[in-house]
Each structure stands twice: as structure tokens, then as C-alpha cells.
Amino acid sequence: MSRSPVRATPPIEDEKLRIKKPASNVAGIKAVANSFKIGIQETGISKTLKTMRTVNRFNGFDCPGCAWPDPDNHRSGFEFCENGAKAFATEATSSKVTPDFFAKYSITSLSEKSDMWLDKQGRITQPMYLHEGSSHYTEIEWNDAFQLISQSINLETPERIALYTSGRCSNEAAFLWGTLARQIGTNNLPDCSNMCHESSGVALSQSIGIGKGTVTLDDFEHADLVIVVGQNPGTNHPRMLSALASCKRNGGSVLSINPLEEAAMKRFKHPQEILGILGKGTQIADDHIPVRINGDSALFKGFAKVFLDNGTQNMNFIQSNTNGYDAFVNHINHTEWDEIERISGISKDRIQEIGNIISKSKRMIVCWAMGITQHKNSVHTIHDIVNLLLLGGHFGRLGAGVCPVRGHSNVQGDRTVGINHHPSEAFLTSLDKEFGINSPRTSGVDTVRLIQGALNDQFDVLLCMGGNLLSAMSDTNATAEAISKLDLTVQISTKLNRSHLITGKRALILPCLGRTEIDQQESGPQFVTVENSMGVVHSSIGSLNPASDLLKSEVAITCSIGNALFGSKPINWKTFENNYDSIRDAIERVIPGFEDYNKRVRIRGGFYLPNGPRDGPNWNTPSGTAEFISNELSTIEHNEGYVMMTIRSHDQYNTTIYGMDDRYRGIYKARRIVLMNPNDMDEEGILPSDEIDLISIFSGKERYAEQWKVVPYSIPRGNIATYFPEANVLIPLDSVAESSNTPTSKSVVVKIVRR
Ligand SMILES: Nc1nc2c(c(=O)[nH]1)N[C@H]1C(S)=C(S)[C@@H](COP(=O)(O)OP(=O)(O)OC[C@H]3O[C@@H](n4cnc5c(=O)[nH]c(N)nc54)[C@H](O)[C@@H]3O)O[C@H]1N2
Ligand SMILES: Nc1nc2c(c(=O)[nH]1)N[C@H]1C(S)=C(S)[C@@H](COP(=O)(O)OP(=O)(O)OC[C@H]3O[C@@H](n4cnc5c(=O)[nH]c(N)nc54)[C@H](O)[C@@H]3O)O[C@H]1N2
Ligand SMILES: [Mo]
């Protein structure tokens, strides 16, 4: 039997683009109204009020929207934001995807629907199986599904199995998921952070000895300067705006560095403060630097040049805490202003003006996200950010430090508890001791290596704990080809997405509980724990009735797979499923920093994990000090075409599309759009709303994506922007960041062709 073709990319729809002026302020009453509107449409009034009342409360569930922390003591009744509201409304939706639905639609016909349509069909209610050659999923019993997985995994060739993780997974589920991989005999644990903050983890480990941020929420109230670079908090971390506003209230300044002047950085009206809703709002950014895409390394080297010229570097701190200073000074002296100006697109005068402020700062925080991590030289750029902070001694001090702002609500926790394709020997030794297993010592694959390997027939089975790997990965067509070569793919999911349509020869969908739902096990209702962007571990407990009686928790599914494969020895999987306290006890024994886990996580607000640079400062690097790391200045060089970044609109959560508007940027009713500088448009003879095709060129191979409408926008010349995931077809699989292997989603060289 053979299947009809299944579309890997969303169909191109007839979109009625409307362009308005970008918003001059964000949040405020409109955001509150929108939150309620979406909630009520998806879930009805009483569920909306119930979820809004419990999200991010001490005894409620953790908002699945992002990893920004909650205030320690004074949580308002509504510690939520518009986009958090969208995230939980789509989970708590009353729409259902039942076996009848799958009987009605073949995977081919589903693939002709938009990503938004797929998500809007609602929660998947029971396990489904796609037989080899079949084009329709049919029902399968849970036990049969577990048997099928166990029979498909050949323990003789564990290197041919991979277990993907998306960052909503709780600490408890992630710890067991990683343990399952090691019991199978592999470190093949690709995860969403490979496409996200991997560059931050790699660079920060080298520079400061820990792959995490060093600030707490409180630090924002004490900082005199916060730099927000390569991040769009108004859309992606709206609750962060309160922290920026509190910095401002206390007399601090906020600087934004971004090719786009994102609306949130202009003026913010706190939705939870009545005056904020009605009044003029707080002006967030005091200054904005419209850096060229991938010009940040140059810019930060420029700031360091000014700093050194001013002679205000903190020599006490540098002498007692760092290594590599002299080489760094030499490197900066040899970096030419011409190159800095050319690559950053910012004049020496402007860099000097800002550099003077930076070199005077006593308490500076630098925040960043995907605008920094998804380039070829991302790891180097993050070294440059840390170098600048080291010059001022901004570690181990109130109001100062690094703040890589995480995306998925528990992506940082997943890594802490063992979702890591390069696990440390110390971790594996204690895991083996705890469970009596022999964990493999060879590194596993990340997402890019998984797809490259699958293209070369090196994998048989892929188990996915959440997410939508097909659409999140670069090079959608190559990724689809790779996944189709697998024998079995298993998706543990809440909602339908394209990864359920582009599958291995056989596929399973295992539907699971979401954060908002009651998780009832043998010993009673369970809670889970998560770690936010600032290293606070706290609990999350759902309060809604599950979308279907047949759902299982991520923990229960993992335990059942473990049990089907290995029985109860040496790991007694079922005890973990019955009572999650036992999982936390095991985590406590295996991973440092979780002492008294069960007790401390039951205290309001949870607890902080240890953090050397913050607590000491002390530095877990080979030299025992922080490192100035000097890398040659670089950027993405190209002879023709444009550099394209792929970004999120205000109406999406990664590959989940909530709606067709990008309100803050003034773009309505369309997603297949390209933001372009009006002067570049003039030169190309392109008018607003004209359609163009995009072609990316890499290593001699061309990739096409048709039919994009052009939107004139204030973006540096030679730079353009499109939305993820529609533009992922253009990102070459082999175009990755050095050292972190993250797809270069923010620097894709493309040519444009007028239609
Ligand atoms: N509502 C909502 N919230 C989310 C998500 C979501 O999709 N929707 N996703 C979550 C996840 S997983 C993540 S990782 C985060 C992502 O959060 P962000 O990183 O804010 O997301 P992006 O839209 O990718 O935005 C990247 C920003 O970097 C800028 N940028 C691009 N290239 C460069 C560059 O070279 N230099 C500089 N200085 N800036 C650049 C872009 O203009 C844009 O403002 O958000 C999390 N929160
Ligand atoms: N071009 C481009 N590509 C990118 C990016 C970019 O900026 N540009 N960003 C990258 C980044 S930062 C990230 S993090 C990745 C995201 O990659 P992923 O994490 O793989 O993708 P998501 O879209 O967040 O996954 C959404 C799906 O997760 C499932 N889900 C939701 N909640 C739950 C739950 O509680 N449990 C389980 N088991 N499943 C659940 C639903 O089925 C939903 O459809 O994409 C990356 N891809
Ligand atoms: Mo992310």
C-alpha cells in the first residue's frame, strides 16, 4: 500500500493583507479584553474565569506561555498576560479531536488545512495508530500502543532510537524520559532547546561556568541599566515588561538593540494596574539601536572599545575573578572601527554615546533571546556580551548580570534534570548508581544531527515528548523526507499539528494531560514542578477536568513505555507513576541542588537552584575564574540578496497559530508577508502588498518559497523578516551556529524574485 502525498508545509491561502501603522503602546485594556475574548471563545465563561484566577498563583498551575518568573511575594489576582491567556485557552478548549474526526479526514486531506485550522480542532481524546500504508489513523488501546512501541525498539541497536523533548515537559516527566533513553542505551535526546537557547548554554558555560542566567527578578528593581537585545518581550514575554517598568520606576534606563523597533519597547500600559490601563503608560526604552541583523558582535566589541578608552573598567573585579583580560584588550584594540560600523550598521558616534553610558553603569543587566542565539556566530556574540559585563564587574552583585530569557515554560528545567545529548560524567555516574543501569557514555544527537542521520537511514524509531519537530526544524522539506524514512514515530501530544501528518512508516499519537488539568494517580492527585528562566523551581497543579477520560499524564506514558520494554527491574517504573514524590526523591539523589526537594517545593513560591556567579561569585570553569573570550569579528557575509530573519507574530505560540494578526506591528489578516525597508522596495520597484518569491542559496543548493506579500517596514536596508514556521523551508539544514549547532533561523541569505 502507498499513501497519497502529504504536505509538509502549510498550504498557501488567499490572504487579505491589511497594513496599518505599528502600535505606539502595548498591553493595556485591549490586551485584557483580548485575553477574555479568546478564553471565552475557546472554553466558555466559567472555565475562563477559573483558569484566569488560578494561573501562576501559588496554588495554581504554571502558565505554559513562557519561562518568565513570577514575583516572589506579591502576586496579584491576575499574574497573566494576553499571550499566556491564549496559551491556556487553546489547551482548555472545549473542541475535541475524536476517532470520528480521524475517520472523516485522511492525513492527506488534513495536510491541506492550515496550521491554525489543525490546532483549532481541539484536544486529541484517545490514542490513535496509523498503520503502514494507511492514510487514516484508527483507534488503538493504550496497552496495545505500549506493546507496539516496545516491539519496535530493537535494544541491540539503541543508537537507532531517538527521544525528542519539547520544553513544556515537567521536571518529573523529563527526568524519567531521559532515564528511559539511558536504559534503552542512548543519549539521543534532541530537544527544542537545540533550536532555541543552546548557543546561550554553550557560550555561558565557557565564559562563566554555568549555562544559565545569573539574575533574579529582584535585580531588575536595582539595575541602573537593562539592555534588551534580540528579543521581543511585548509579544513573547509580556510579563517581563512589568520588570522593565519597575527598573524605570526606580530611575534605571532601558536600552533596546534590535533591527526592529518593537512596539512593546516604546510604551507599556500595565494591564494589572488600573492607572496603567487608563493612563499614558510607562515609556520602556530610553533609546533604541537599530542594529543590522547579526551586527551585535560588532556592536558589543564597539562598546568594549569605548569602555577601555574611558578607563573605567573594574580592575579589582577583573584581577580577582577573570582570566584572559590582556588578550582581550589586545583583541579589542585591533578591532577596527570601520569594520564595527560596517557590520553593525551603527555609526561610531552613536556607539560612543551608548558606550559612555555603559561604561558608567554600576549595575547592568543584559537580556537576550532568539535574535542573538540563531546565527552562525551566536556563541561568539554571547562571549562578547559577557566580556562587556566582565569589564564592569557585573556579576555577584545586586542589579547586575546576564539574563538569557528562555522560551518554553520548562525548557531550562528539562536540561537541569537530564535532557541533554552531551550529559556530564558526574550526572551519568549518579544516574547509574540510583537506578542500577549502565548509561551509554557516547554523546547523542541534537535535532540537526537527528535529521541529517535519518536522511542517511541511521534511525528507526523517534519518540516525541510534545512539540512539533517537523514544523519547528529548519529545512522543512528535508526534515519531512528524513522523518518519512523512519519506521515508527510516536507523538505524545495535546493538540493536532503537522508532525502527526508527516510521520514514519507507522505512527502513534498518544494524547496526554495538559498543565491546566487534574492529574489523578493511584496515590491521589499529583502536582508537577518546573524551573523558570531564573532558576526557581516551583510547583504547578491543574484544576480543570481532563479533556477526555482516556488521557494519561506524560509521567504515566513514560512509565508505561519503560515497563513494557523492561518490566520492573532494575527500575520499578510503576512506583513513579503512582506517586510523583518518588520521582522527586530520585531527582534529589541524582542532581545537586535539589536537597529536600519535596519539602522545599511545597513552600510558597518554591526555591532557587544554586548559581555560582550569582551566589559567589564563584566560577565552575577549568581556570576557576570567569573567562574573557576573544573571537575574531565576524558576520554573515553575502554578495547578493538580503539577510532574512524568521520571527514570531503576536498571534502564535511557536508552531501553534492562534490568529492572523500581528497587532503591534500593524499587520493584519496575513502571515505570508515580508517586512522590507521602503528604500529597498523603491530600488527593486516593489509596491506595498506586491507579491514576491523567496529563494535561499546555500552550498550551491537553492530552496524556494513562493508568494509572499511585501510590507514596508522600518528595518535596516539589506535586511528582511518573515514569520516562522512558514519560512522554515528556506533555512538550510546544514546552516548552523558554530559549537551549538542551532539552525541559523535569524540569518538566512535569500534572493527575491518579483512575480
Ligand atoms: N506569545 C508567544 N510567546 C512566546 C513564544 C511564542 O511563539 N509566542 N515562543 C516562546 C519561545 S520557545 C521562545 S524561544 C521565546 C522567543 O522570544 P523572542 O526571541 O523574542 O522571539 P522572536 O520572534 O524569534 O524574536 C526575536 C527578536 O529578535 C530580533 N532580532 C532578529 N535578529 C536579530 C539580530 O541579529 N540582532 C538583534 N539585536 N535582534 C535581532 C527580532 O527583530 C525580534 O524582535 O518566546 C517564548 N514565548
Ligand atoms: N525559523 C524558525 N524556526 C524556529 C524558531 C525560530 O525562531 N525561527 N524557534 C525555535 C524555537 S526557539 C523553539 S523552542 C522550537 C519549538 O519547537 P517545539 O517545542 O517542538 O514546537 P511547539 O510549536 O512549541 O510545539 C507545539 C505542540 O506541542 C504540543 N503540546 C502543547 N502542550 C503540550 C503538553 O503540555 N504536553 C505535550 N506532550 N505536548 C504538548 C501540541 O501538540 C502542540 O501542537 O522551534 C524552533 N524553530
Ligand atoms: Mo524557544
Image (tube, rainbow, N blue to C red):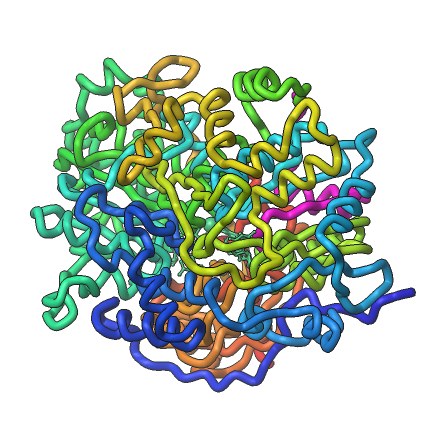
| Rendered position, 731 above or below 12 | above
Classify 468 as above or below 74.
below
Q: Is residue 443 left or right of residue 236?
A: right
Q: Residue at x 51, y 31 (%)?
A: 583
- Residue placed at 38% from the left, 51% from the top? 61
Q: How many marks?
A: 0
Q: Give how far across and how far down residue 596 sits, in percent.
A: 37, 24
User: Can residue 678 be seen here?
Assistant: no
Decide if residue 561 is on the left or right side of residue 404.
right
Q: 745 or 509, which lies in front?
A: 509
Residue drawn at (46%, 46%), measured in percent from left and top?
525
Farthest front residue? Answer: 523
**In-front residue for pair 267/340:** 267
Q: Is residue 681 above or below residue 464?
A: below
Q: Residue at x 58, y 32 (%)?
A: 575
The image shows residue 330 at horizontal and vertical percentages of 33, 24
Asked if one can make out residue 156 in the rendered structure from this viewpoint, the answer is: yes
444 in magenta: yes
Pick out the residue farthest to the right. 1
Quarter of the image containing the N terminus? bottom right
- The stretch of residues the image draws in magenta is 441-468
Residue 604: give x, y in percent of width and height: 27, 39
Please check the rendered image and state whether residue 547 is part of the magenta-colored stretch, yes or no: no
